[in-house]
Amino acid sequence: MRALLIVLTVVEILAVVLVLVFYLVAIARSLQRTATLLGKVSFGVRAIETECAPIGPVVTTMNGQLEAIAGALAAVTGLAENKSVGSHVAVVNDR
């Protein structure tokens, strides 16, 4: 009986080791696929970075131009308000 228990224990230990090996191999394969996909993603991000690099200086230039336009529009708005107030006063005086 004791020999049977020893044999069953050894079989159980071998079964546990085999299951551990199986899952470790499965995890290793999964990590390998993940590393491959991350390499592709990294390559794509570098390509996007390269394509978008010229945007920074252009945006700075555009912001400067838009600020100049905003300043000019503020002046035009002020002139239009002065003009409309002046014409409104003239209409009121004509009555």
Image (cartoon, helix red, strand yellow):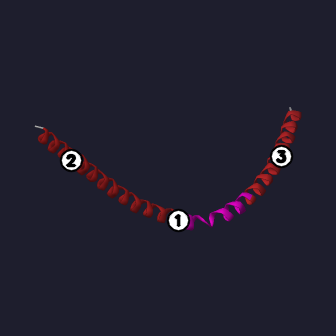
Indicate the quadrant containing the N terminus: top left, top right, bottom left or bottom right: top left
Q: In which quarter of the image is the C terminus?
A: top right
Which amino acid is tagged 3? Gly
Q: Which residue is drawn at 34% across and 57% down?
A: 28
- The residue most toward the front is 2
- Secondary structure beneath label 1: helix
Crowding near the residue tagged with mark 1, few <14, some 14–19, many ≥20 C-alpha atoms within 10 Å: few
Q: Is the magenta stretch mostly helix, strand or loop?
A: helix
Determine the CA span between mark 2 and mark 3: 87 Å
- Reading the image, the residue beneath label 3 is 78
Asked if the residues shown at circle 3 and circle 1 are in contact, with their CB atoms under 8 angstroms apart, the answer is no
Name the amino acid, label 1: Arg
Q: What residue type is labelled 2?
A: Ala
Residue closest to the eye, 14 or 75: 14
Tag 3's secondary structure?
A: helix
Q: Name the residue under label 1.
A: 46
Q: Position of residue 79 (x, y in %)?
A: 84, 48
Q: Compute the Cα span from label 3 to label 1.
A: 48 Å
